[in-house]
Image: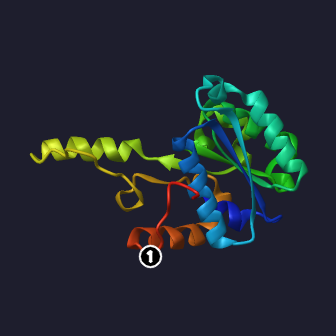
Amino acid sequence: VGTIAATASKSGKVGFIGGMEIDLIKAFQAGYEQGAKAVNPDIEIQVAYMGPAGDNSAWNAPDRAKIATEGMIDSGVDIVYAAAGGSGLGMHQAIAAAGGSAAGYWGIGVDSDEYVLPARAEFKDNIITSMLKRVDVSVYEVIKSVVDGAPLSGIVNFDLSREGVGYSSSNPAVAPLATVADEYAAKIISGEIVVSSTLD
């Protein structure tokens, strides 16, 4: 989704809202930043975490996420990606308060397609895409492997090549950006681009 954010951004400034500052969420940030910088090496990426490691309130602090997103918007950010659990609601609230997509501000959801989630219905027109964790794909593949008599075992990485992750296309606004995202996805699958889970 970093490629989509960088392609959609008119200001050259994008944001990332993380929940708890742990390696798992830092990996989301790393992928987002690498994607954005692949499209625009000069892009500015602002980052805010809702709490340090061990602070479980970081996952349900929409008030903090709203304030952080408002600060980003005030400094010129026009696209914000939230990987923050329930805190992500605050990002959507801030995007909407700034005028939403009609004013050039977009949010990016996480895990499932937030554009079609009833809980995000009032914000859907401002959700350009979501980063998808395709649990449906992994569950299907595991069940199919058992039915086929060759059960999957050990660690199986459901990455782009296995369609285990991706981005949503429910909002028609993402269609013009899909070509760029798909080009980069193909380069990742082929091994031409290697995405790191850290920013080091």
| Quadrant (top left, top right, bottom left, bottom right) of the N terminus | bottom right
Residue 184: horizontal and vertical position, in percent?
53, 71
Residue sticking out furthest to the left: 149
* Res 52 → quadrant: top right
- In this figure, which colouring scheme has been used for the structure? rainbow
Q: Is residue 149 visible?
A: yes
The crowding category of the residue bearing disc 1, from other C-alpha atoms within 10 Å (few below 14, some 14 to 19, many at least 20), is few
* Res 118 → quadrant: top right
* Res 21 → quadrant: top right
Residue sticking out furthest to the bottom: 192
Name which residue type carries label 1. Glu
Which residue is under mark 1? Answer: 192
Residue sticking out furthest to the right: 74
- For the point 15% across and 44% down, which residue is it? 151
What SS does tag 1 mark?
Answer: loop
Residue 105: horizontal and vertical position, in percent?
80, 52
In the rendered structure, the answer to whether residue 26 lies left or right of residue 186 reads right
- For the point 22% across and 41% down, which residue is it? 143
172 versus 38 height, above or below: above
Q: Is residue 112 visible?
A: no
9 versus 82 height, above or below: below
Closer-to-camera residue (108/35):
35
In the rendered structure, the answer to whether residue 101 lies left or right of residue 196 reads right
- For the point 84% across and 53% down, which residue is it? 102
